[in-house]
Amino acid sequence: MTEPGTLARGGDDSLRIEAGGGSYRIEAQEVRTLLAFCRVVPIIRDRHTPAAGGGKEAEPVSIEGHAAISRGGKAVLLYTRAGHFIIPVVSFSRVARGEAVSAPLFPLVPDWQDGTV
């Protein structure tokens, strides 16, 4: 079963997702697009690769999932390679606006995966 994750606001107004041992982000502009227009937005994997000279090497952009508003409009669904997660829109918005430091992500497990039918 997928472990829970955490959603937090980054220093550049992007949202950071820590889940399944991975670190992901949703860019600030994409957060606005998700909340204002209910459009599906990409989730990008954070990769920290130090350069040989100690400087920061250009990080390749790797889209590792997507985020979408649920059909009912009350939750944000996050789909990554580390797993699928759900968070209430209210909690997601509070973190995006800086009203909350972080919020938990709950694993989204389909019925057929948890052993029940």
Image: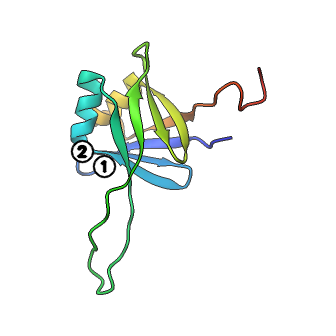
Q: 10 Å neighbourhood of mark 1: few (<14), some, or many (≥20)?
A: some
The image quarter containing residue 76 is top left
In the image, is 17 to the left or to the right of 40?
right
Residue drawn at point x = 24 percent, y = 22 percent: 37
Measure the alpha-carbon separation of dots 2 and 1: 5 Å
Location of residue 67 in the rendering, given as x and y in whole percent from the top left corner: 39, 34
The image quarter containing residue 93 is top left
Residue drawn at point x = 71 percent, y = 27 percent: 112
Residue drawn at point x = 69 percent, y = 40 percent: 1
Residue furthest top in the image: 72
In the image, is 2 to the left or to the right of 102?
right
Q: Name the residue under label 1.
A: 10
Residue 89 is marked as: none
Location of residue 50 in the rendering, given as x and y in whole percent from the top left corner: 35, 76
Q: 10 Å neighbourhood of mark 2: few (<14), some, or many (≥20)?
A: some
In the image, is 112 to the left or to the right of 21?
right
Quarter holding the C terminus? top right
* Cβ atoms under marks 2 and 1 closer than 8 Å: yes
Q: Is residue 19 above or below residue 49?
A: above
At label 1, the amino acid type is Gly
Residue drawn at point x = 32 percent, y = 80 percent: 51
Residues 87 and 91: in front is 87
Q: Is residue 54 above or below residue 82?
A: below
Location of residue 7 in the rendering, given as x and y in whole percent from the top left corner: 42, 41
Q: What element carries label 2?
A: loop
Location of residue 63 in the rendering, given as x and y in whole percent from the top left corner: 37, 49
At label 2, the amino acid type is Asp
Q: Name the residue under label 2.
A: 13
